[in-house]
Amino acid sequence: MSEDKPSRQKFKWTKELVNIALNDGMTQEEISKVCRTQQSVVSSWKNGKNKATEQQLAELLRRYGARLNRTTAKVYLVSNSSSGLVVKIGQQSYQEPEDTRIVQMEGPVLFRYTFCKPIRIVRAKGWDLGREPIARWIVHGLPHGKLLLVKQVRRALTDTRLRRWTATIREVSQHDIHYCVPDWVDCTDDAGRWMSSLSEPMTASELVQLVDDYISDSNRVHSPHDELVLPYLIRKALVEHGHPVPGIDRITGLE
């Protein structure tokens, strides 16, 4: 009998689906008619105050379901301590933290930023200057306007694993080329290359202050390029996603 009853489970992406319909030209009144409810209910869906059931949204799902991006969950390998989260540059040591967990983080990704270091790329006729990713920041949106920062660093091979990998590379190269063996963990899936740490939920103002403090600290890992662009890019991303950011000049209502 229970299989014949329509599901009353709330649809997680109600707000996103309703806003897709509105952006496509439907009015709240039109949505309320196809969903067989009141306009005030649609307004609460639009603002994220309430969620509808899949049965209520059946027509909207038929029209716009293919345009709904549900891939908002990311899975991270997270260190439970900060001792292993050291960006490795040059001969700086790296220790893979023993206390780790796998975390599924739900919430849209609002911002990504990658920190790089310059590297020398040897070519047949000389060399070029390249960029190697060493750290990354990812910002997720949370309910009630909060944000969560995921800090990532590249994982590195150490000790026995590094010696085994070095021996493998030398065997493959047959000693006929000069090759600098990379000690980063390599993986066809980029997610396997990174170790993460999670911040506490914070407001947009708190995140902006965190970025400014990080860039102003010369002991942190960042380049002159990061110092110039990161404070601007984080503010740009937050404003474009509707978060209040102090110190932004707004020009509206021009005629």
Image: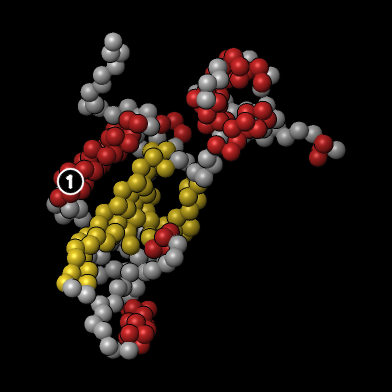
In the image: residue 173, left or right of residue 18: left
With respect to residue 116, does 138 lie above or below? above
Q: Position of residue 221 (x, y in %)?
A: 21, 55
Tell me if residue 229 comes above or below residue 115 in the rendering.
above
Quarter where residue 51 is shown: top right
Residue 10 on image: x %, y %: 63, 33
- Residue 99 picture location, percent across and down: 42, 63
Q: State the residue at coordinates (37%, 69%).
A: 185
Q: Which residue is mark 1?
A: 227
Quarter the C terminus occupies: top left
Q: Is residue 74 visible?
A: yes
* The image quarter in which residue 44 lies: top right
The type of residue carrying mark 1 is Glu
Q: Secondary structure at mark 1?
A: helix
The residue shown at (27%, 88%) is 176
Mark 1 surroundings within 10 Å by alpha-carbon count, few (fewer than 14), some (14 through 19), many (20 or more):
some
